[in-house]
Image: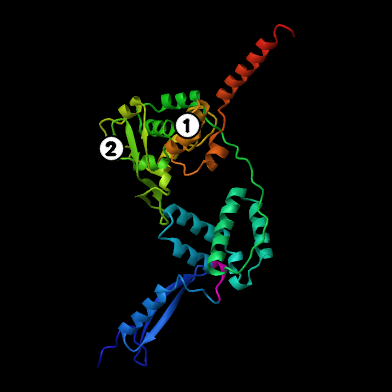
């Protein structure tokens, strides 16, 4: 008795199935290709798969369109961005995602935006809408969306002072966290850049930043090139910072970005300092450089910012202590000037 060929149909043809998409309920859908031979079926499948990203679907839901958009961008966007997109899709687009893309309208989106804005920050809502708008632009470019976004809120950020940083460094002296804080506060380097830093990246007092540790879509950390060209840079540190890293080979700090954050949060609680994030050490560095008169262009280059938009809106937060000094200086001048006739 002849042995039946794998994937053979009663007609004798060969059928091959290729994954297409996952719907809003988590069900996987496949595309079938049938041909007289396996080679022909594989050819048809490969042909369809190659043109999938460019093909404009005739009838798909918004949820499916978002998934195809993310798939199409996976090779050019950072793993952390792809992971954030998939989380937005999974957690925030289930309801609106059921709407057919060709039936989507501004009213549907406005109601969705308003519901999201009740519990989420304006910035996060704008990020979610950005993913939806980019998807619509790719798969339904003729659809014009007119929606009102939530008003931006000024971030309530605490910018640490010199005294705050000194207290932290005293508390973590001799630990990996001490080195991480020095690199962030006096660099400023990002968490991912610090975790990816190796001894071969240090020459004299200079640190070359050419990579970063980020979390991929599978929630595993990996080391990759920086997200922007401006992030490639060389920072010359004070000698005492470099001395702290002398004798270390391979990775300077054998920790993940999340591990640094957890250790930092414990140090903040131990020292009784006002709550602020590890990332706020970059705010501190930029604010100090601005306060002592360092030109914007050099601050941008040292911090790895591609433009001054973020720096001007966030990183120039005046340090409370420095503000007090300047206020005292200003008032002292006026008191001295008016002392003879007031």
Q: Count up the numbered dots.
A: 2
Q: Is residue 250 above or below residue 100?
A: above
- Name the residue located 32 percent from the left edge and 33 percent from the top edge: 206
The one nearer the camera, 272 or 104, is 104
Q: Main secondary structure of the magenta part?
A: loop
Label 1 crowd (10 A; few <14 / some 14-19 / many >=20)? many
Q: Is residue 167 toward the left or the right of residue 144 in the image?
A: left
Give how far across and how far down residue 196 sits, in percent.
Answer: 34, 43
Q: Is residue 199 toward the left or the right of residue 83 in the image?
A: left
Residue 161 forms part of the magenta stretch = no
Q: Is residue 335 toward the left or the right of residue 17 in the image?
A: right
Give how far across and how far down residue 52 sits, in percent.
Answer: 44, 73
Q: Secondary structure at mark 1?
A: helix
Q: How is the image coloured?
A: rainbow
Determine which residue is flagged by label 1.
Answer: 285
Q: Is residue 62 above or below residue 179?
A: below
Residue 60 forms part of the magenta stretch = yes
Q: Is residue 100 in sight in this rendering?
A: no
Label 2 crowd (10 A; few <14 / some 14-19 / many >=20)? some
Question: Are discs 2 and 1 less than 8 Å apart at CB?
Answer: no
Give how far across and how far down residue 50 sits, in percent.
Answer: 40, 73
- Name the residue located 71 percent from the left edge and 6 percent from the top edge: 340
Q: Quadrant of the C terminus?
A: top right
Q: Quadrant of the N terminus?
A: bottom left
Residue 106: image quadrant is: bottom right
Residue 199: assigned label: 2
Q: Is residue 254 toward the left or the right of residue 326 in the image?
A: left
Q: Is residue 200 above or below residue 161?
A: below
Whichever of labels 2 and 1 marks the residue nearer the N terminus, that label is 2
Q: CA distance from mark 2 to mark 1?
A: 23 Å
Q: Secondary structure at mark 2?
A: helix
The magenta segment: 59-63
């Amino acid at each position: 008795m002849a042995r039946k060929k794998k994937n053979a149909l009663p007609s004798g043809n060969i059928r091959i199935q290729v994954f297409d998409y996952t719907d809003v309920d988590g069900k996987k859908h496949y595309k079938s290709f049938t041909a007289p031979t396996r080679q022909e079926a594989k050819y048809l499948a490969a042909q369809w798969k190659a043109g999938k990203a460019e093909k404009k679907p005739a009838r798909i839901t918004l949820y499916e369109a978002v998934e195809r958009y993310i798939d199409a961008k996976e090779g050019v966007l950072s793993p952390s961005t792809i992971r954030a997109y998939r989380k937005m899709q999974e957690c925030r687009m289930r309801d609106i995602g059921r709407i057919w893309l060709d039936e989507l309208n501004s009213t549907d989106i406005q109601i969705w935006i308003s519901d999201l804005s009740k519990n989420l920050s304006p910035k996060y809502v704008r990020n979610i809408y950005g993913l939806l708008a980019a998807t619509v632009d790719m798969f339904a470019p003729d659809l014009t969306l007119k929606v009102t976004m939530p008003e931006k809120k000024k971030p309530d950020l605490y910018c640490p002072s010199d005294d705050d940083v000194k207290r932290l460094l005293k508390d973590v002296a001799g630990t990996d966290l001490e080195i991480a804080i020095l690199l962030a506060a006096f660099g400023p380097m990002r968490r991912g850049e610090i975790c990816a830093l190796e001894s071969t990246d240090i020459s004299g007092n200079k640190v070359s930043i050419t990579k970063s540790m980020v979390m991929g879509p599978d929630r595993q950390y990996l080391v990759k090139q920086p997200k922007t060209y401006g992030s490639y840079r060389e920072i010359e540190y004070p000698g005492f910072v470099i001395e702290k890293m002398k004798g270390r080979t391979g990775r300077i700090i054998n920790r993940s970005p999340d591990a640094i954050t957890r250790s930092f949060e414990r140090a903040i609680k131990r020292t009784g300092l006002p709550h602020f994030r590890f990332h706020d050490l970059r705010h501190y560095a930029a604010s100090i450089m601005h306060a002592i008169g360092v030109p914007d262009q050099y601050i941008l280059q040292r911090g790895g910012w591609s433009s001054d938009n973020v720096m001007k809106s966030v990183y120039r937060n005046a340090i409370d202590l420095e503000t007090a000094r300047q206020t005292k200086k200003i008032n002292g001048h006026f008191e001295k000037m008016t002392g003879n006739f007031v």
